[in-house]
Image: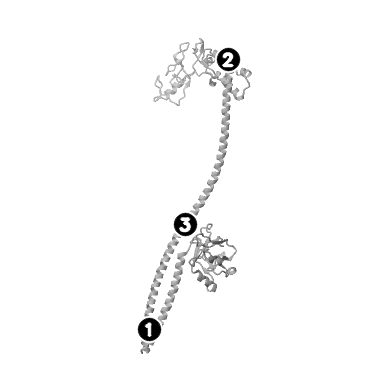
Amino acid sequence: MATARNIESSAPQLSLMQQANVANVLNSRLSSLNIEPEDGGFKEKFVLKLENKYKCEYCHLALCNPKQTECGHRFCESCVRKIIGSPKPVCPVDNVPLFENTKHEEFDCPSFPVPCPNKCNTRILRGELNSHQLQCLNVIMACPFSKYGCNFQGTNLELKKHEAETMAQHLNSVLMKNGDLENTILELQNKLQEKSKMIDIMSAQISHLEKEQSKLAQLASKNESRLGYMQKMLASQTDKLMNIDQASQQTFQKQEESVREVKTLEESVDKLQIQLRQLELAGRTGGMGTGAGSLTALDNQVKRHGSLLSVHDVRLADMDLRFQVLETASYNGKLIWKIRDYARRKQEAVSGKTLSLYSQPFYTGYFGYKMCARVYLNGDGMGKGTHLSLFFVVMRGEYDALLPWPFKQKVTLMLLDQAPAKSHLGDAFKPDPNSSSFKKPVGEMNIASGCPLFVAQTVLESGTYIKDDTIFIKVVVDTSDLPDP
């Protein structure tokens, strides 16, 4: 029989992988046949008659891996497992219980001669049957190169002759198989490289997505906190609106009461005037003596009613102003100021009667800064007589103690275009933290700060910024970075 050494000397130069495959094929010839039964004892016919003590008490065949129980009976190892695994594990000879955790003694069974199963007329011991199968000339075996495509089967002698005659074909088959395997390995390596590249690309994409997810998580957290702040603001604004609505209703009721009182006083004055005329008429006709005292009393009463009317007029004017302020107040940092009768107010500014106008107050929030705008229709400082000057004013508010100072919010001043083109004029500035105009107010309001040369009067009066003798001024204060007080 050819050996691995003979092949190495006679075969062409092979790769390490090819040599290993050839060696594996030859070594497979030396592997033993499994002649031990899977279940029960040996079924071969022994040359000599087998004594009963060497037979299994369960399958009645020659003992295979014999075990002896506590009661002294002998069984094959597989038969013992079968008995113990039954619903009633007892010895089939004397019904003694058998337990799974009991260690059964091993029984040394001698090896008995058996005839060769390949009919070579050789008597061999049962324990040596395995090695005899490798040497028996009559055993039928498949060619060890069957996995490479060879379908030959025969005895050991025929197989040795076949191997010697077809060694070159076998080696070619091995080489072809190895070539296919090497090509497969090369393809797998190429696919592995492609997969590695894809993994790198996907890893980069995952890293990018993780960064995006982190940004989105931060943005979501910021938006969530912002939403919470807005919800608080909305709740406070709702309460404030309810308070304003109640204050408006109370003011309106007081105004109606004052109007009714004024009407009553006016009716009283009318009656007094009628009485006065009657007394004057009576005096002319000769009742001067008696009418003088009545006239004096009536005159005093008229003066008293007149002073009461003046007080009510002042109260009505004050209530009307407060009602307008409540009605037009803004709490989002934005002011739209409507200035009517532009021509008259401009003339009053030119004549020096009313140099400047103040807007209604507006706020950065219900608990925020209080502010207003101030306008010089005929200009101020460098812009006097040529420009409209517009300024921003920080006022003293009710919640100044809770706010950060100095005032640092960006301010945008605008003159709104009333034409469809909306070519608004505007200017913006960041407050100077060292200026007294933006420190915490100690009086009703700070010094105004803004643009003396905001817009030339020629531009203002020749464009579409004035309509129906009305102009609109807008002031926007950036509230995006204000903390929650």
SS for tag 2?
A: helix
Residue tagged by mark 1?
277
Task: Tell which circle, 2 or 3, labels the residue nearer the N-terminal end.
Answer: 2
* 98 or 396: nearer the viewer: 396
* 45 or 180: nearer the viewer: 180
What residue type is disc 3 on?
Answer: Lys
Q: What's the distance in space between the residues labelled 3 and 1, CA to CA?
A: 66 Å
Q: Characterize the local packing of mark 1: few (<14), some (14-19) or many (20 or more) Cα atoms within 10 angstroms.
A: few
* 144 or 52: nearer the viewer: 144
What residue type is disc 1 on?
Answer: Arg
Does the image show residue 398?
A: no
Q: Characterize the local packing of mark 3: few (<14), some (14-19) or many (20 or more) Cα atoms within 10 angstroms.
A: few
Does residue 455 lie above or below 144 as drawn? below
Residue tagged by mark 2?
165
Task: Tell which circle, 2 or 1, labels the residue nearer the N-terminal end.
Answer: 2
Residue tagged by mark 3?
232
The residue depicted at 56 percent of the width and 28 percent of the height is 184
Task: Tell which circle, 3 or 1, labels the residue nearer the N-terminal end.
Answer: 3
Q: Position of residue 209 (x, y in %)?
A: 54, 44
Quarter of the image containing the N terminus?
top right
Q: Position of residue 468 (x, y in %)?
A: 48, 66
